[in-house]
Amino acid sequence: MTPIEYDHSTSPAKRLRFDPYVLDLERGCLLLDDSEIILRPKTFAVLRFLLENPGRLVSKEELFAAVWPNIAVTDDVLVQSVGELRRALADVGPRLIKTVPRRGYRFESVVYADPTIHPGPRDDGAAGASTVGDVPAPGPPSEPWPLALIPRLDWRWPAVGLAFAVLLIGVFLTINRAGWEVGTDSQAPSAKPAIAFLPLVNLGADSSRDYFAEGLTQDIINALGRFRGLTVMSWNAVSPYKGNPSSPAEIARNLAVRYQVEGNIRQKGNRVRANTQLVDANGQVLWSASFDEALSDVFALQDAIVTQIAGTLAIRVTQVELSRAFAKPTGSLEAYDYVLRARPALQKPDRGNIVQARAFLRQAIGIDPGYAAAYSSLAETYFIATSMGWAESPTDFLARAEEMANKALTLDDADVRARVVLGRIHIFYQRYDQARTEMERAIAINPSDAGGIAGRGNILLWSGQTEAAVATLELAERIDPELNPSDRFTLSLAYYLKGRYDRAIEQAELNLRKTPGAYFNRVVLAAAHAKLGHSDDVARAVTVIRRLDPTFDPAEFGTKLLRVGDLDHLRDGLRKAGLLAEQSAPR
């Protein structure tokens, strides 16, 4: 039994399987445990069309054309057929057939087909066609493939859809033989192929629109990150290559990745043109594609790129992962544009740009009050201001951050940024169990999200699992070399607690070079130098601490550590540095 994509120019499969049911196309009946469920012919045809297009929105117009060609029928006829189907499918009917108000229906299940057709390549010669480089000889797949592998590829792009259907079948067969099977839960992150999606180059005449190309790149990175079969480098990892051409071999070596995607984008009027290609470390092109679409279809463009990359790398993905990766964030391009304008401040914040970002995000919400990502980004601005010491009232700012994050989750419970912000707020208040719940949910949604992984590392550190904290924070740093100041401080402290004082100093100094205002790193710096007997360095660090923060209370520093031995170890360094009196700080 082999799930495949349909090419209606060939003979159809004989049986389609989904959940406990089988649709027998030869006998024209629906079966449950070999018992026949009677359906009217047109209702049978509706079900068949939905099964042939699982996971994507099927419009009413498509159903009318497929089931009632050249016949004028009303919506009521279709509604009756769908109602009959749901009743025939009993308890699972409403879950399997979802109504999208005023638009159509979506079939929510993986569908398997007997291996009776193998569509061959067809060259439409249109924009959107894709090509695949040399791959090993075919071998049998290790398990069936679902028809629902691509749930939301916009089939208004006929060349893209056909090219990918061909690509999917051929490449899925071939790459598995090379031993690249990925996506099982048991695999360690290092066992998964790593990919870097390099910044799309803006070829437009207006350089002020660079943020649009950057934002599109970031959203594709986030979508790819939701496939647990891949480790995806963060925007911060790839952004140094913007305007800095490097060879595939150099990028592969620097980022420790197996694959790279490079490309460009040109926005002209209300059209967007994109060219992308997937290469390996040797520069061999594995796949390339060109797209030319209306600006209003920018989200469909993202979907097509992500889907084709996943298909080319033979990533096994679940329906949940796919639906999350291809969820359309907003119906308003203007609101999306404001969110993109706010992102640079979230990545490299300062007092001024974080306020400007907040204004952009409020404008986005004003345009689309149902835009979850705008709320979660707004929550992040309040949390960043608090963690950096810029909040007039930390308690009020954290309350606003929590409110905005919860609002985002009411709109989209798979919003990773909202989960991470809530987790960090829980860490701030030492609610580690609740923090762990939020971080684990974020990582389940996007296993390559460095913020969620680093949040998990924070919890491990404060809970006394220092070895695991170091490994987790190092993984986060590999995905995102530009760790935020709080997470890099945590990594520095973790190294200190493991007795790796040189590494603790290295991370603290790096943090201070990148963020001079992150003064709390100087405390770890002083303690680590004291442990190594670097008296001059200790004196310099202590002098700066006392000048910049005369109210610093060493007895309170590190009290979030739950393991007594960790707190004692830290306080021993503070005493050696002269920051803590011998009899100070009873627990």
Image (cartoon, grey):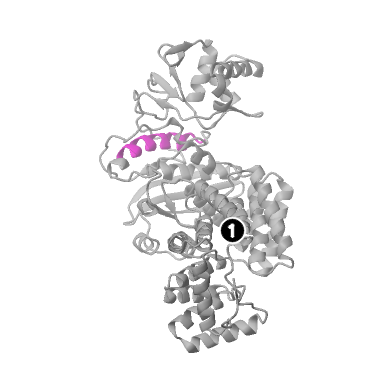
Please state, as top left, top right, bottom left or bottom right, where the C terminus lies in the image. Answer: bottom right
Residue 69 visible within the image: no
Q: Which residues are magenta?
A: 157-174
Choose between 463 and 372: the one closer to the eye.
Answer: 463
Residue 379 visible within the image: yes
Provide the residue designation for mark 1.
Answer: 211
- Is residue 170 magenta-colored? yes
Q: Vertical placement of 174 versus 103: above or below?
A: below
The residue most toward the bottom is: 536
Most frequent secondary structure within the magenta stretch: helix
Residue 85 position by quadrant:
top right
In the shown orientation, is residue 558 left or right of residue 402?
left
- Is residue 150 magenta-colored? no
**Secondary element type, mark 1:** helix
In the shown orientation, is residue 489 left or right of residue 12?
right
Q: Residue type at mark 1?
A: Tyr
Identify the residue shown where x is 60% and y is 82%: 545
Locate residue 322, reporting x and y percent. Answer: 49, 40
Locate residue 256, reporting x and y percent. Answer: 37, 60
Choose between 131 and 472: the one closer to the eye.
Answer: 472
Please state, as top left, top right, bottom left or bottom right, where the N terminus lies in the image. Answer: top left
Locate residue 136, reporting x and y percent. Answer: 26, 43
